Image (cartoon, grey):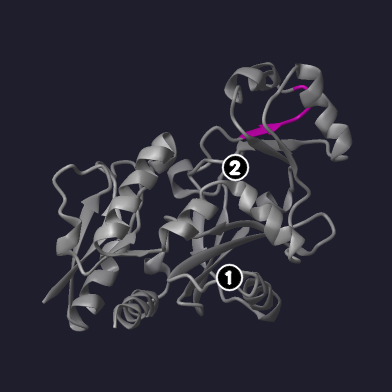
Amino acid sequence: MNTIAFLSMDDLEGYVSDDELAYAPLQKLGWNVEAVSWRSKAAHWERYAAVIVRTTWDYQKDLPAFLETLSEIERKTRLANPLQTIRWNADKVYMRPLEERGAKLVPTLWSDNIASEQQVRGWFDTLRADEIVIKPTISAGAEDTFWLSPNSPEISEMASVFANRSFMVQPFLHSILKEGEYSLFYFSGIYSHTVIKVPQPNDFRVQEEHGGDIQPFMAKTELLNAGEAILRLLDEVPLYARIDFIRDASGQLALMELELIEPSLYLRMNEKAPRHFAQAIHAWLL
């Protein structure tokens, strides 16, 4: 039986992963799966028919080393998603060219430094927002992401948190609390399933690790059309993609993120999803 690797991290304690649900359908298609940490010094990448980037949820702590590992993998075997795609997707500035191509985004300010508290306070007026969110452009799992009001004591910390670090600023949209964030999943460009993610009370982060509630969702035409529109903006169809949407202040769906590196796929949320993912991998490998 041929073997493929699901690229992971040294320790998944504290994280929720369900990638193993794809193992059985992949075995039925003739593929054995091994989970391997991207930090492994003992891995022989050439022994795998392919390496699929999956739960590498600490890559942002050392992006250069992560990309170097992926470069080594791609020299020795097939890699999905491809290194070129991952390089592009690793910094959230990828959303700027998507917006230029027609994607609707949440209004966003982009910057590389914070000179003063006054600069931070000025963003409320610039965005015409009572509350804002600041987050690094290279991040995962809502790490170093701040939800601020003009009186938030954390404002004084922003200059040190984002020293020499690119970041983005957006108005805080209360729809995340009332409606939630939608995530649509596509395998080789084919729609698989959708989940809706709602933060726990008094929080804004939707990830399970932060107490978010994740539920399956039956996507209707508006949401499906929005997802397809984003996929059409890509130069190449990725093996896997997660597209996150939130409803903006005008009531329209806006792109929050296009995840092409290591998105949680929530395979457990749809009984057909593990098979969809396995079939996409199998077809890609043929």
Q: Is residue 240 above or below residue 64?
A: below
- Nearer the observer: mark 1 or 2; the answer is 1
Q: Decide whether residue 150 is among the magenta residues.
A: yes
Label total for image: 2
Residue 142 is situated, as x and y percent measured from the top left of the image, at: 53, 41
Looking at the picture, tell me which residue is in the foreground, 13 or 97: 97
Residue 172 is situated, as x and y percent measured from the top left of the image, at: 73, 43
Task: Name the residue located 40 percent from the left edge and 35 percent from the top edge.
Answer: 62
Residue farthest along the front direction in this orientation = 75
Q: Decide whether residue 236 is among the magenta residues.
A: no
> Residue 105 occupies which quadrant of the picture?
bottom right
> Residue 123 occupies which quadrant of the picture?
top right
Looking at the picture, tell me which residue is in the foreground, 196 or 231: 231
Q: Residue 201: which disc?
A: 2
Instruction: Say what secondary structure mark 1 lies in.
Output: loop
- CA gap between label 1 and label 2 equals 39 Å
Task: Name the residue located 31 percent from the left edge and 47 percent from the top edge.
Answer: 69
Looking at the picture, tell me which residue is in the foreground, 280 or 176: 280
Is 161 on the left-hand or right-hand side of 56?
right
Task: Name the residue located 66 percent from the left edge and 19 percent from the top edge.
Answer: 159
Residue that mark 1 sits on:
235
Residue 182 is situated, as x and y percent measured from the top left of the image, at: 60, 63
State which region is magenta. 146-151
